[in-house]
Amino acid sequence: MLKALLMGILVGVILVFGGVWIYFTGGHAPVAVADPPMPLERKLARSSLHAYLDKQKPVESPIPADEKNLLAGAEVYKQNCAVCHGLPAEPETAIAHGMYPKPPELFHGTGVSDDPVWQTHWLAENGIRLTGMPSFKGRLTDSQLWQVSQLLANADKVPPSVKVALVTSTATPAAAPPSPQTAVPGTK
């Protein structure tokens, strides 16, 4: 009787894992951005991120939230973050519209202004799996990461100069595309 029960449990576990394997490797799992989420996908991803962050030791920011650093953070944000997370008073970008899960619009609603600075720094430095949020470690300096984190943590109370910097374009005029070189017969 006990042997049959154990065998039944083992067969049940094997069938569950086999079914999950077939679901993913047989092309049944949703993989396109427009597909509906997998069962429990949002809940599991969010829960694991929050559980991991809860285990992290908070780090004090070496960068003060002064106007100079907030302005520098605004430039970092415009160059690296705005394409997905948007700018104040601007509509959702085409890139953000095509992402799943949707990146939060950090200047609409509470954004991350209710998150501690260290947490925003950790997220920007390490990225978030299964969300499209990249890691900026090695791409931005630690100072730049702290500056943009201070900006976002204080987004609801930045000085007017920072608000202006966020909506002012810093794009330089595009250079003319290089002219195609035509091969001249007989030359290398």
Image: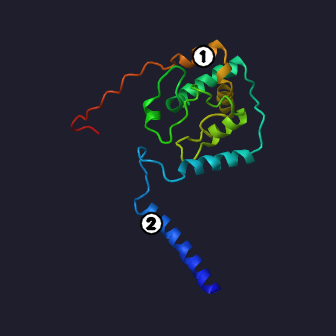
Q: Most extreme residue toward the left, as rendered? A: 185
Q: Nearer the viewer, residue 78 or 132?
A: 132
Q: Where does the image place residue 171, in percent across and percent down from the top left?
A: 48, 20
Q: Where does the image place residue 114, in percent across and percent down from the top left?
A: 68, 30
Q: Nearer the viewer, residue 186 or 43?
A: 43
Please say if 177 is above or below 5: above
Residue 64, numbered circle: none
Q: Where does the image place residue 20, in percent across and percent down from the top left?
A: 49, 64
**Quadrant of the rendering where the N terminus is positioned:** bottom right
Residue 108 lies left or right of residue 180; in this view the side is right
Residue 98 lies left or right of residue 146; in this view the side is left
Residues tagged 1 and 2 counted as in contact (Cβ below 8 A) = no
Q: Which residue is mark 2?
A: 22
Instruction: Say which amino acid is labelled 2.
Output: Ile
Q: What's the residue at 55%, 21% (across, down)?
A: 88
Give the crowd class for mark 2: few <14, some 14-19, many >=20 residues within 10 Å.
Answer: few
Q: Where does the image place residue 11, in percent across and percent down from the top left?
A: 54, 77
| Residue 75 lies in quadrant | top right
Instruction: Say which amino acid is labelled 1.
Output: Lys
Label 1 and label 2: CA atoms lie apart by 51 Å
**Callout 2: SS:** helix
Please say if 30 is above or below 149: below
**Quadrant of the rendering where the C terminus is positioned:** top left
Residue 8 lies left or right of residue 176; in this view the side is right
Q: Which residue is mark 1?
A: 163
Residue 182 lies left or right of residue 91; in this view the side is left
| Residue 2 lies in quadrant | bottom right
Give the crowd class for mark 1: few <14, some 14-19, many >=20 residues within 10 Å.
Answer: some
Q: What's the residue at 73%, 23% (across, down)?
A: 65
